[in-house]
Image (cartoon, rainbow, N blue to C red):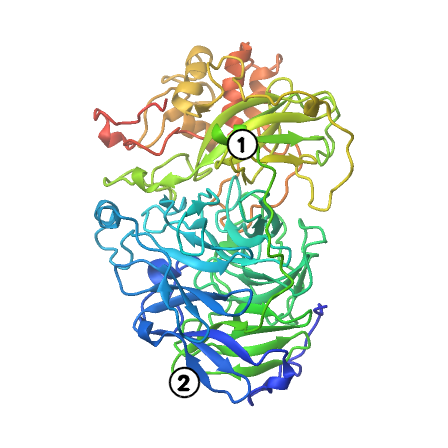
Amino acid sequence: MFRSGLFTLVLLSVLLAPLRAEDFDFDSVLFIKRTPFQSTHYYTDFIDGSIDFHSSLCVLSLKDGSVRELVPSLADGIIGRCNLSFDAQKVIFDYKKKLGEGFRIWEVNLDGTGLRQLTFPPDDEEARMAKYKQEGHEKYFHHTDDLHPVYLPDSGFCFVSTRCEFGILCDGADILTATVLYKADEDGNNLEKLSNSALSESTPSITNDGKIMYTRWEYIDNGSVTNKGLWSMRHDGTGSGDIYGRNIAFPPVFGMGRAVPGSNSLFVCIGAPHMPLGVGTILLIDATKDRRTGDPVTYLTPEVDVRHQWGWDNVPGGATKPFQPEGLIRTTTEFDGKGNTSKGPLFMDPFPLDTHRVLASYNPDKEWNAADAYALYLIDDKGTRKLLHREVGTSCWNPIPIKPRPDVPTRMTGGVIMESLAEEGLAQVVVTDIYRGLDGVAPGTIKYIRINEQIPRPWSARRTWKGDEYDQQHSVITDKTHLGLKVQIGVVPVESDGSANFLVPADRNIFLQALDENYMEVQRERTFVNYRPGELRSCAGCHENSQDTGQVSRPRAARRAPSTPGPQPGETSGHRSLHYPTDVQPVLDKHCISCHGTENPKGGLHLTGELTERFSRSYEELLKRDVFPMIRENYPKAGNNHYLPPYTLGSHASKLVKRITDTESPCYVDLVPEERIRLTTWIDSNGQYYGTYFGKKNLKYKGEPDFRIVPE
């Protein structure tokens, strides 16, 4: 096992002589030779990091130190990442020929023969580029890119791609774009999108039990630069779930994960910052330990840590556990800044050999983006860094031992699929006991589950006009609360034993809220699940740990047909946009502006619907006065993703709800249930204003036909 705890500089010995072949159970190593990407973010290698168009896919002989280039005909382009087939006979990699063209997936035999391209641009690529290209951003033309390929054990391969055409939510300029998981057959045909994330997914690998492990960036009411954790799914996209990192503030990125040989619970990865390049420190994750804490993590390279959103931190005495600053919940922003160094020691591409050694790219002391900074090393748990191979004038990346991997299942199994539901684009979810994990919530409290969806922002919502960008939102949705659009799918009942059985739309980003009898939120799921068409899935409870596998007798809800999400009182349809001007303002107009109107409003609180530059007077006044606890996804950006117990957020914690429902309060309002539900649903949405990414929103466009359109 990797050792945790202290280390000394004496242990950090670097042996400059090449290692001997007899030190390993393989005699050659696959690697990529190129200069570092000059990326501004950990995920933007293909956007702004691809500058130096020269690279090589190479095989290093451990017997004599010689290097053989596999694809010299592609030397004038950029090779990003590579992976080896399970029989160690083929190599799959991503390659960019020149500026203005996207990365594509290629394959070559290990002897250098059989070079072929597997993915190609869409037939309408030129039209896409013309439609979405932005002047002044010539590094990236909004073509599509296929990246980070890995072979699947039975056949075909998995990769990430921008073919989803989603813009990063916290990108006001909409230059940055998301990559999500796809798969294809062995010839590159039959492309299938496996996920629907609104933010980037990256660096898939295959675990020892045949699952796809990858890094997923997400935020639903979390800090915008955290939550790049390790996730896994079956080869068909079913059964997606987090391995580690969702509730950890720093490092904000758990990238390039790989399974330790022979284990289904030990994983090695890089802990990296949000910006710039995704290099950092090497971590071992033990997935059997409590994933909400730092306990699963052991630092293999404790001399460097990541405790800020930009850069790296040299830590006196050595890092021991992920950094969770006290009070980093809603207001602290000091960790949004930079670490104390931009130089090595920095690591990347760890490949575990056993429980105490990894191969990795290592930069001992140069700037993070220096051309020749990174070489191949053997890293062990005693603090030793032994040089394996260095190139003159350039760097070495992505080391992979060339040997078969026979223990991985060759026949992959998918999830339970019900074809009748798949044809309708639906999935089925069974919650066995919603009170499991709802500490302090009395049985019988939860009556409903509200089903919501986070909507990715499509390239088609790109605006060509000025004024609608705000707080890093390309098309403004909220006043400094969340950055992505939320839509309500509907509500379903919860049985007396805490069970629920319901349908959800497939291939959507679904998250849930547990509601009481008044349709008020008790707990919020601050993450999402992609359910595949026809998938049948169950969960033990609300926010349960992965180790929670307690047995539950057959729940009541499982004895009946699944519920279809329906409306709350006062709604004609459960599936609707959440839109402040039509949901909340009519309630304020009816009950509040007599005291809080334009002239001499009580307490100086204006609650009229008067339009402001991007929102309305009442909306800005209410949010300014913090009438309910909000997660402001940019304040702070780093952190803000800690687990929060029931009743921490939402309408039960709202000062506004308490004042208007307290019969002794001067602000008491006798709301009918339909009015109250509209108000509390808005609060439970974390204060969303607009219900769509589309249309013009700045007040200067008033009078134009697409000004502040009401979503249908």
Please state which amino acid type lies under the numbered disc 1. Answer: Glu
Q: Quadrant where the N terminus lies? A: bottom right
Q: Mark 1 points at which residue?
A: 419
Give left or right: position of 312 versus 319.
left
Q: Position of residue 536 (x, y in %)?
A: 60, 34
Task: Say if 616 sits above or below 267 in the image.
Answer: above
The residue positioned 50% from the left and 12% from the top of the image is 570
Looking at the rendered structure, which numbered label has been put on residue 710? none
First along the sequence among labels 1 and 2: 2
Q: Position of residue 650 (x, y in %)?
A: 57, 29
Marks 1 and 2, how far apart at CA: 57 Å
Q: Quadrant where the C terminus lies? A: top left
The image quarter in which residue 580 lies: top left
Q: Which of 244 and 302 is in front in this view?
A: 244
Crowdedness near tag 2: few (<14), some (14–19) or many (≥20) residues, C-alpha within 10 Å:
few
The residue positioned 48% from the left and 61% from the top of the image is 338
> Does residue 366 appear anywhere in the picture?
no
Q: Name the residue under label 2.
A: 392
The residue positioned 57% from the left and 48% from the top of the image is 233
Please state which amino acid type lies under the numbered disc 2. Answer: Val
Q: Which of 500 and 69 is in front in this view?
A: 69
Q: Where is residue 657 in the image (x, y as percent from the top left)?
A: 57, 21
Task: Say if 336 sits above or below 506 in the image.
Answer: below
The image quarter in which residue 436 lies: top right
Give left or right: position of 494 versus 342.
right
The image quarter in which residue 72 lies: bottom left
**Which is more foreground, mark 1 or mark 2?**
1
Mark 2: which secondary structure? loop
